[in-house]
Amino acid sequence: MSMTSLWLKNFTAFDEIEIGFSPGINVFVGANGTGKTHLMKVIYSACDITITKKHIAEKLVNVFLPSGRKLGRLVKRRKKSSSCEIALTRDYVNIPMSFRNAQGSFPLSDVVDADAFVGNLKAKAPKGKLTLRISFSNHVTKSDSDQVTVTGQTEWQNKPVESAYIPVKEMLSNAPGFQALFDRREIHFEEVYRDIILRAALPVRRGPPDSSRRNLLKALEMALQGKVTTKNDEFFLRNKQGNLEFTLLAEGLRKLGLLWVLIQNGTLLSGSVLLWDEPETNLNPILYGPVVEILLALQREGVQVFLATHDYAILKELDLRKKKEDNAVFHSLFRDNGGIRCHSVEEYLSIHPNTIAEAFDSLYDREVKRSLGGTDG
């Protein structure tokens, strides 16, 4: 159930932009302020409401957290009245929840290897398309206002899609008590922080994990040198030293631990969507390779992945490790004549403009110049 395209008009930093997505890995690159995180938050909001059944306008407010929770502040700022529009399209497949054999009907939950069973069904089932649209003016203050126009939401929510948004700030070390505080008090936190804690706290799915999920978990366990456990909403890394609370771990290892949990509890299965904002943050570059391998393996299992990155090594690891059959697209966001544009390509060398590579090229040129006895300016 992958997202296929997103169209925005007069939304936050965007005048008008349309982006087609890969069913595999989508990487957003671009200078600060080109809207990478905003794109991912829109996609995540649309995914999340298929599970929570919230109104899309309410979810956008909770995720973006505009001042005063005024929805209209998400409209691109202009000197006069204006409106914004959002349209997100995705594929879907019809998967029955019960089946028949010689002994009669039985539910999907009774299938021993349900993950592989559903994956096989999805590969054979006919696909359709759904589009969710929302528009509102900059004068709208409340998300439930009759000035908010939404179409396609009922059909969109009738086809659930699991998703997880990993924000830049690691949250599992703050999990104890955070959900209760968020639900009972007015605190200024974007809802993505509460949501990722809820995803991580989900119990393990029924039945044993399939072989591909076991392999993913083992790869992460090698990087972590242990497994993640929980007790009273607190997360621990269990290794040879015992149980180490997440507050004592390096933040990069906490992020790997979160990825392990999301795979282990079945949040990231075929048909789900993973959105990860700056995976390189607080992660030692030696772990970039294993992380990229995990992401490539997830897309091979039918997980759609969205990344926003500023890191050259992350891009090159993906470029060097992806195979011919892997689906990966680089979306380069850039400013042109005052507006933000997008150039999407499948090959790293075709990314244009590539401010990340330009910065590294500049460093290399200055290093060579200094080595040859020139100035370093």
Image (cartoon, helix red, strand yellow):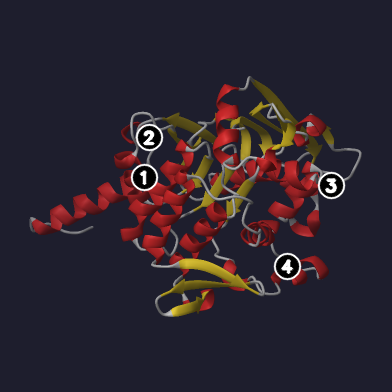
Distance (Cα) linking label 4 and label 2: 41 Å
Q: Earlier in the sequence, mark 4 or mark 1?
A: 4
Could you tell whether 355 is left or right of 74 in the image? left
Q: Amino acid at mark 4?
A: Gln
Residue designated by label 3: 143
Question: Residue shown at 33%/34% (left/top)?
Answer: 323
Q: Amino acid at mark 1?
A: Leu
Q: Position of residue 26 (x, y in %)?
A: 49, 38
Q: Report helix, strand or loop for mark 4.
A: helix
Q: Quadrant of the C terminus?
A: bottom left
Q: Position of residue 318 (x, y in %)?
A: 36, 43
Residue designated by label 2: 351
Quarter residue 327 falls in: top left
Dot 4, how many residues are within 10 Å of its Cα: few (below 14), some (14-19), or many (20+)? some
3 vs 4, front mark? 4
Residue designated by label 1: 315
Marker disc for residue 199: none
Distance (Cα) linking label 1 and label 3: 38 Å
Look at the image and tell me whether residue 258 can be seen: yes
Dot 2, how many residues are within 10 Å of its Cα: few (below 14), some (14-19), or many (20+)? some
